[in-house]
Amino acid sequence: MTPTIASATVIATIVASGWLAGPSAASLLRRPDRHGRGFLEVSSWEEKEGCARLTNAGSHFTVDVEVGTPGQKFSVVADTGSNSLIVPSCLCVQAGKCSQATRCFVGHDRSSTFHLFLAKSTRKPFEELLTFGSGQIAGVIARDTVRVGNLSTTMNDGLLLMVDKALNFNTAFEGILGLGPPQPEKEDRRQVSSMGRGDVADEGEGVDPASGISKDQIRDIVQKILGGAADAAREEGRPALTPHFGSPKAVSAAQVSRPRPGEEAPPDADAVVVEKPPRTSSFLEQAGIGRFSMCFNQGSEGVLGLGGPPKENALRSVGMYHWGLDFRGVSVGGKTQKLQFCSPEDMRPGQETPCGMIPDSGTTLLMGPEEQVIELLEAVCDQWERCSSNFTALQRAAEAADKAIVKEYGLNPWELQVPPKAAVAKLLLKDCDSWMRDSEQGLGELPTLSFHVAGAADGKAQELRLSGVDYVLRLENSSSASVCAPAFGPMDYPTQKNGPVWIMGLPLFFAYTVGYDVEAKPPTIAFTSVQDTPCGSCGAKPSVGLLGASSTAVAAGSAERAKLQFNPREVRGPPRMPTTAHGEL
């Protein structure tokens, strides 16, 4: 059940996270973004290409971003399943809505490029509510300069300052870098309201129905965001917020963003008045970056590649709101026959694909309809000799017990039940420490899974192959013994056009570099096996393309995968769930 979230009672300045290491300022170039607003900074060795390090946080990967002038740093979830850039506000922390351990953003008197968007009708901030698989976030829309890796732009269409949250997140949460595809301009599916909108008197303590807080509280919130937060804290007997950075340098008028057409500058220089809320599109869309890629290294950092040339053999996305593909089922091991789900023969009238698939970097597991996940695990057991032989032994034991009881008592009142194959597979994996290290193959015993995907229109197809080291995880455990589990989770996401949808999380990004291209029409998704071209790193100029490969790198990657056969990849904390499981692709 999705937790509910209280209306924001404090409004924010942004959570700080460390920005990705990149070239020094002297090695960067500036150019206008594609909208003619702000600027991009690009590495001097390869214009339009950039690289950002991804850090393994246990159940997800984070990327460092820098917000404001001078920059305030944050580690945010790199999420291809959402679109907004979100960072927490120091006022959110101060109000107890965000963790005290969380770094947070301060706008007024800390960032010379900070502006808060206010509704013209109310002179109040726009509040946006976002729902994720792990819960909900409320934020207000602001403008500031943002840097990811060696790319920087002014977020003229808005970023979100988190003011409240109800998330099932057991680690420090410093925000999200949404990397989803651009949303259709004619359709706005956001939950956005202007704080203070409604029949509330200009003075007094009336409660605003839009935000659930009083007019006086709203006025105080706006004052704190636009200035005087430290003074207000002192008046209330609380310690003033201590920034994580030095005081900003004096800037010229030319360095401060001016209102654009349709915007009105109020007396306070830190706010901009507009008729409607900005679209809060993604960082990459506002920066004019049409291509990016993601991959994760085993046991170390990953790579967010920004820009670069088009990928070969890309598949056309079938999704309008998500990165989606035509999913046509799974084959297991050496079998060419697919399992009995996601078959074109089962498509209903009006359905365009038998199933859908979303490659989502922000989800921990491989998620699909429960009955399909069970069928897949049963097929794994059939093709895994250790599992199939144990299942057969259980059947024989149950039959022998039944005969013995009937012989002794004349009947068997207990009807001993043999656990299903999927349960046997899970039990064997849970007890992986008892057999894995004594096995010659370790997780190499398990069959390879082939996920059959295709693109829209032309139907170009590809098999995405995951071996046992990809789809088996080691769970965080207080004892020294390993406890393993299949990296699958149940989730129902039905659609009319694309049938049931699977969401492919972290395991896919460990096995493949996934490339996304919004410059292609329609947008495309490409998969390059890390066994052929290792993920690489952001540490040096690539020798081949953006991420490049050498025989040494391939050998090193193979050695890392070989280790995982006896020491599976660990997941720490509860799995991060998909952003959404409703609506069309």
Image (cartoon, rainbow, N blue to C red):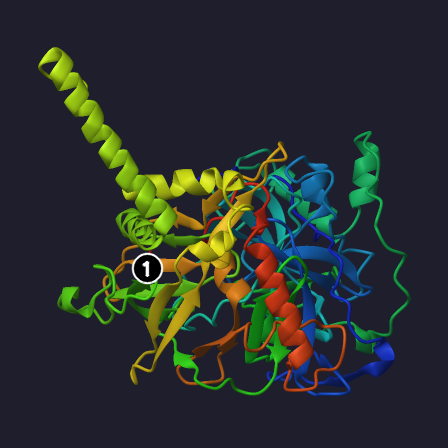
Task: List x then y, in percent, for residue 411.
Answer: 10, 16
Q: Name the image quarter holding the C terminus.
A: bottom left
Residue 133: x and y in percent read: 46, 48
Q: Is residue 154 left or right of residue 6?
A: right
- Give x and y (percent) for residue 147: 72, 69
Residue lying at 36% horizontally and 59% vertically, measured from the top left = 502
Q: For the view shown, which residue lies furthest in the top direction?
A: 409
Instruction: State which quadrant residue 332 falls in.
Output: bottom left
Classify mark 1: residues with Cα within 10 Å, few (<14), some (14-19) or many (20+): many
Residue for badge 1: 501
Residue that appears at 54% across and 68% down: 281
Q: Report x, y in % for residue 552.
A: 68, 77
> In terms of depth relative to the viewer, which is nearer, 322 or 555?
555
- Camera-side residue of 355 and 281: 355
- Residue 110 visible in rendering: yes
| Residue 199 visible at all | no
Residue 502 vs residue 202, the one in the foreground:
502
Task: Report the quarter where the N terminus lies.
Answer: top left
